[in-house]
Amino acid sequence: MFIEEKFIQFLHALQLHRRLPRGTHSRVHESDHQRTHEIFQTSTINALLEGVFDGDMTYGQLREHGDFGLGTFNALDGEMIAFDGMFFQIKSDGTASLVDDAQQTPFAVVQFFEPEVARGLDRAMDYAQLKAYLHTLIPSTNFFYAIRIDGLFTYMKTRSVPRQTKPYPPLIEITKTQPVFEFSDVSGTLVGFCFPDYAQGINVPGYHLHFLSEDRKAGGHILDCRVQRGTVRVEHTSNFHMELPTQGTFLGADLSKDQRETLHRAEE
């Protein structure tokens, strides 16, 4: 009964629309996106776990839905982080570069970021303590949250993923040999989201965060960190819009599996 109630809550929050011709939806509802602080997502995390890596949306199209967020690239070619209207690709060697509008993504989450909460961090925190602190800033675990932290990190551990070739393996197989990067005393920006537990299968429940160094040269998906000081900004929303691929391997992917354990191992 508890699971059913949570799923009903999710359906109330989720606005799942049949995909219109590219650009149509955005032109009609662009002002609505900005007014309602809607989170926009293309595809699902379970599809990514199943190896659905072919890009279905260009970054030029994605920009119409947000200036802040995270995701990946066609053929799983690295990690994406976006903020202040700039989109960056962190390749499997850990280096960062600006994204071209013609590049494609199989999975991304963005929004127009307008934080409602800003707090200074005046004490050191490890990753677990930081997530516990972030939890004190959110009014309910049933909403969706966008999070940005600018600060000095005494330790940062990230990963990226290498470009894949067909036939694509499941994501969990790729992360077993993922390149990992460690930084000490690095300033930069942390970007990501906190999704409710009932969003399991759609997105990553809990915190999903990416990092980019202040010099815009390196970063990745965060595995661990320790923040010395900084500023936290948070925005909450109850509006979530998802568009699904209408062709390709997504159509035949088995998305009915319970992937909680697999996702946990892939995110570590």
Image (cartoon, grey):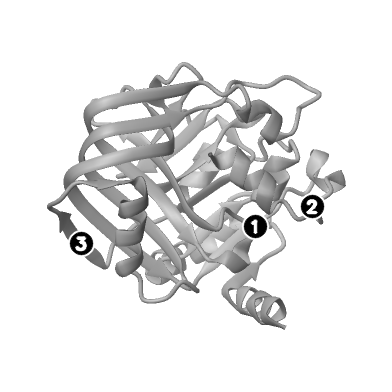
In the image, residue 111 sits, relative to residue 225, either above or below, namely: below
* Quarter of the image where the N terminus is located: bottom right
- Note whether residue 43 is visible: no
Q: Which residue is mark 3?
A: 118
Residue under pointer 1 = 202
Q: Quadrant of residue 181?
A: top left
CA separation in Å, label 2 and label 1: 10 Å
Image side of residue 190 versus residue 221, left or right: left
Give the amino acid type for the residue marked by disc 1 in the picture.
Ile
The reply, left or right, for residue 210 in relation to residue 177 is left
Residue for point 66% across, 66% down? 16
Label 1 or label 3, whichever comes before in sequence order = 3
* Distance between mark 3 and mark 2 Cα atoms: 37 Å
Residue under label 2: 255
Front residue of 165 and 50: 50
Under mark 3, the amino acid is: Ala
Residue 167, how many percent across, how many down? 81, 24
